[in-house]
Image (cartoon, rainbow, N blue to C red):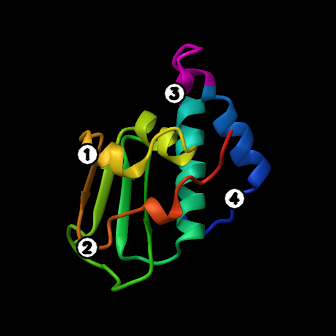
Amino acid sequence: MPASRSVDPAELRTAVAAVVPWLTGDGPEPARQELAKAVRLSLRTLAADAPGRSVEVRVPPFAAVQCVDGPRHTRGTPPNVVETDPRTWLELATGRLDWAAAVDAGRVSASGSRADLAHWLPILRL
């Protein structure tokens, strides 16, 4: 899903709310389709909130977006990359996990001078 498409805030809230019980430990792991939707919509929201192409944020296997203003990257591996798993990303996106704590714990790989997303997180609170 391209980051340029706007995200309906109600759709984002519904998608993320569906996985909150799993994030809080009160429910089972969501279906792959539910998890993918929450990750994709939240990443697209990040890209809309922090427009640009200097940082690539990857949440395999579901999505990757480019965001944050700065020098545009066009070929090969970008100089600023953030990568994490779906659960960690959604914990960051909902404010359940602090950016610095996630990086310190090795739950987020962030390389490059612009790869600090703390300014744009959380994306929403549920």
Q: Amino acid at mark 3?
A: Arg
Where is residue 111 drawn, in percent x and y? 22, 62
Where are the magenta residues, as a range? Answer: 21-32
Where is residue 13 drawn, in percent x and y? 72, 43
Q: Nearer the viewer, residue 49 or 58?
A: 49
How many angstroms separate mark 2 from mark 1 (CA)?
A: 16 Å
Q: Secondary structure at mark 1?
A: helix
Callout 3 touching callout 2 (CB < 8 Å): no
Q: Amino acid at mark 4?
A: Val
Q: Earlier in the sequence, mark 2 or mark 1?
A: 1
Q: Earlier in the sequence, mark 3 or mark 4?
A: 4
Q: Amino acid at mark 1?
A: Asp
| Numbered circle sitting on residue 104 | 1
How many angstroms separate mark 1 from mark 3 (CA)?
A: 28 Å
Q: Which of label 2 and label 4 is nearer to you? A: 2
Quadrant of the image occupied by residue 2: bottom right
Q: Which residue is the site of mark 4?
A: 7
Q: Is residue 17 magenta?
A: no
How many angstroms separate mark 2 from mark 4 (CA)?
A: 28 Å
Q: Which residue is the site of mark 2?
A: 113
Callout 1 touching callout 3 (CB < 8 Å): no
Q: Earlier in the sequence, mark 1 or mark 4?
A: 4
How many angstroms separate mark 1 from mark 4 (CA)?
A: 31 Å
Q: Which of label 1 and label 4 is nearer to you? A: 1
Q: Is residue 25 magenta?
A: yes
Callout 2 touching callout 1 (CB < 8 Å): no
Q: Residues within 10 Å of mark 4 (few under 14, many from 20)?
A: some
Q: Residues within 10 Å of mark 1 (few under 14, many from 20)?
A: few
Q: Amino acid at mark 2?
A: Ser
Callout 2 touching callout 4 (CB < 8 Å): no
Q: Which residue is the site of mark 3?
A: 32
Q: Nearer the viewer, residue 59 or 23?
A: 23
